[in-house]
Amino acid sequence: MKKLIYLLLYCTIPMVAQGQDMLISKNASVAFFSSTVVEDIEATSTTASSVLDLKSKNIIFRVNNTSFQFRKKLMQEHFNENYMESDKYPYSEFKGKITDDVDLSKDGNYIVNVVGNLNVHGVTKTYQTKATLTVSQGTTTAKATFRVRIEDHKIKIPTIVFKNIAEFVDVRVSAVYQPKKP
Amino acid sequence: MMKTVNLILKSLVLFVFTSSSLPCFAQDDLEKELATTTPGHQKVTSTFKSTKLINGHSNETLYKNDFDFKVDHRFGDIAGNNGGIKQFFGLDNSTDIRIGFEYGISDHLTVGLARAKGATAVSQLYEGSLKFRLLEQTTDNQVPLAVTLFGSNTIAAVKASEDPTSATAYNKFSDRMNYVGQVILARKFNSNFSFELMPTYIHRNFTAFRDQNTLFALGAGGRMKFSKRMALVVDYFIPFRNSADKAYLEEKNAAKFYDPLGVGLEIETGGHIFHINFTNATAIEEMQLIPSTTSSWTKGQYRWGFSIARRFSFAKKEKEPK
């Protein structure tokens, strides 16, 4: 019986600890910019979600493709229907890991390296970028920018609008995390 | 007996605890956290790509501050008595031409102005229209149908006829008014197929002797996408005529009434929408093509037509939050 109690304790402790180390953001923002001589295109989603596990340093960002807001609504329609094919690939997702050895339990600013896989339009590619983490009084903020080559994710740009859409798109992500409620 | 039950319970408890704590180390668990954030009730977009199919309207309206310029053209009969090589399969003639402008007041309300030649004696048409998106279909089928209301007023500017039995023997300005009211019920069944029904009310303030002023019709239309940018579009109208008046008019004009059917290819290039279509209707305005089509597919009285639509966005740049 004693053994069993120890075993139970052993099993439950990491669960509780894990719960506290898990940070969640449900209104993270993901924005992208495409800039050419002809046209500047930008879109933002403020309903992305992200989780950060302080212990394993795993991080996931997920955004619903239809949640990107464009200034021109027709462009938004084309983005979903012709380029992202949002009915087939509803999400874009980044699954990565902070590779630096940092202790994020203390307040401060940290610039860390993040490596992981980005899945856009059903195509996964490995990316590495620098992210800024700010820990202050229980809230953690993460910010990162990186460049995505449209062609890498098999998104076809028809020749007629080739000059309007940049080859590389700058992506900016940011999230304000709250600890996971037990 | 009690011992075995106890053991089972113990192992069950053990199993529950271990299984709930162990996967915390895996990344899958982070994903589980995200699963709860999926938004519901998403609106279905682009049921149709254009505000019009061939002869009828689609449920689509323009976005706020979008401007749409559209040219419609119908040529002469391809075959039959008035077609063939002599008329170069209809290309020598044009039965109707329409130039239209539409503007999105909001994402739900579109206003339109158009000028059409008009295919019958009732010609030189000016059309003003309002289109209101009442309901939008949602992806979770909470709202299974999209509903759009369409209303138009078409004014015939043609010189009044001296013959009092003619369709254009106008006495006063209000005689020249024609109204169309439509409820467009549409559903996008999957990413490639959409279908709509269009119960239609038409009122013409003045018509030829014994022609109906008020007429109900039912329209149906569909779009079948077969490549990323190309689709087959079809629409059809059944006008419900009073049979005695219909027989009288058919005898008097020596021409039968037929239901307008249009079949076309839709090409979308991102900003432009082209239609290349075939229809037996000679007219383009609803108030004319639904009650007054007297040409038949079976007699070779179909024509090719096209429409070119270009959309411009005047969406204002939002102020950057400081």
Image (tube, coloured by chain):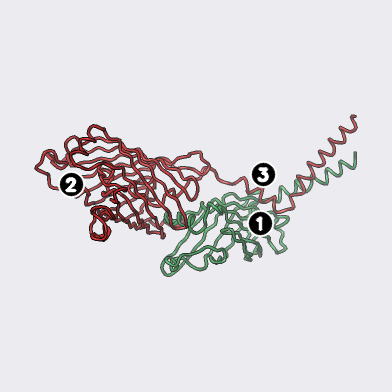
Q: In the figure, residue B176 lies in which quadrant?
A: top left
Split into 4 quadrants, where in the image is the C terminus of chain A?
A: top right
Q: Earlier in the sequence, mark 1 or mark 3?
A: 1
- Outermost residue, left side: B162
Q: Is residue B76 left or right of residue A49?
A: left
**Which chain hosts label 1?**
A
**Which chain hosts label 2?**
B
Mark 1 and mark 2: Cα distance apart in space: 71 Å
Colour-to-chain, green:
A
Residues tagged by mark 1 and mark 3 found on one chain of the structure: yes
Up the image or down, A94 lies above or below B3; here it is: below
Residue matched to label 2: B121
Residue matched to label 3: A181
Q: Locate residue B281, reporting x and y percent.
A: 28, 48
Up the image or down, A12 lies above or below A165; here it is: above
Q: Residue at x 90, y 29 (%)?
A: B1
The colour chain B appears in is red
Mark 3 and mark 2: Cα distance apart in space: 74 Å
Residue A15 appears in view: yes
Q: In the figure, residue B267 lies in which quadrant?
A: bottom left
Q: Locate residue B297, reporting x and y percent.
A: 31, 48
Residue matched to label 1: A59
Residue type marked 3: Lys
**The one of B62 and A14 positioned closer to us in this rendering:** B62
**Which chain hosts label 3?**
A
**Total numbered labels:** 3
Q: Locate residue B117, reporting x and y percent.
A: 21, 52
Q: Is residue B302 left or right of residue A94?
A: left
User: Residues at badges 3 and 2 in contact (C-beta under 8 Å)?
Assistant: no
Residue type marked 1: Ile
Q: In the figure, residue A149 lies in which quadrant?
A: bottom right
